[in-house]
Image (cartoon, rainbow, N blue to C red):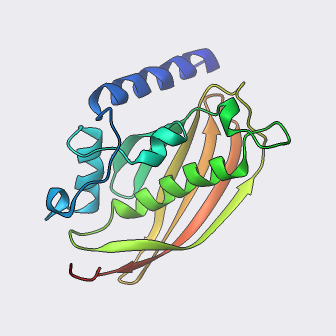
Amino acid sequence: MSHDEALAQWQEEEREVRAKIRPEPGVATMAQIAGMNGLEQMLAMLDGQLPPPPIAQTLDFTLLRAAKGEVIFQGTPKFRHYNPMGTVHGGWYATLLDSALGCAVHTTMDAGRAYTTLELKINLVRALSDKVPVVRAIGRVRHVGRQMATAEADLVGHDGKLYAHASTTCLVFDPPKR
């Protein structure tokens, strides 16, 4: 597949997902997610049953796919994401990768279980600008235990270029009853 064909495919997939998800961001209520495991919650977001988080709108990215232990987010680097040096701010990379890492872990959570990031490590290997039309953060779980989970993610362009890679360690726990 050529780079142009890959770009067209990625953009079409994003259009299809955005047509199904809710247009307005929000946060799911405890009642909305009661009894749902993490993967069911992610799939409900993709089906428009739950709202996408506000950060996705703020930073121009969206969840594209979710399966147990793996998610894909797609983002569009824009001029408004620039740092003073004239490239996309490292925080944009970090947020997109952290979303892929955390949501990959989230897809493995049983109903009623939770997680939080303990450690996040990012390697920026190539500068991003608004001339790069789209990138994907592909997150995959490496390990999930009773108290700890680890995951890795790559940030890649439609042309196969690697822009960054990251890893995380998450604490897994039973949240306090509200």
Q: For this view, does 72 lie left or right of residue 68? A: right
Q: Tell me if 30 is positioned left or right of 70 in this view.
A: left
58 relative to 123, above or below: above
Estimate the x, y position of residue 79 in percent, counting from the top left.
70, 30
Q: Residue at x 27, y 83 (%)?
A: 176
Q: Nearer the viewer, residue 162 or 83?
A: 83
In the rendered view, tell whether residue 49 sits above or below residue 110: above
Q: How many marks?
A: 0
| Quadrant holding the C terminus | bottom left
Image quadrant for the N terminus? Answer: top right
What residue appears at the point 39 percent right and 84 percent down from the top-left corner?
147
- Residue at image point 39% right, 58% down: 69
Q: Is residue 30 left or right of residue 129?
A: left
Q: Where is residue 82 shown, x and y percent of the image? A: 73, 39
Q: Is residue 60 rendered to the left or right of residue 122?
A: left
Q: Position of residue 17 (x, y in %)?
A: 35, 30
When the figure is inspected, residue 163 is found, relative to residue 150, above or below; the finding is above
> From what the image shows, is residue 178 above or below residue 89?
below
Residue at 33 percent across and 56 percent down: it is: 68
Residue 51's x, y, as percent? 29, 44
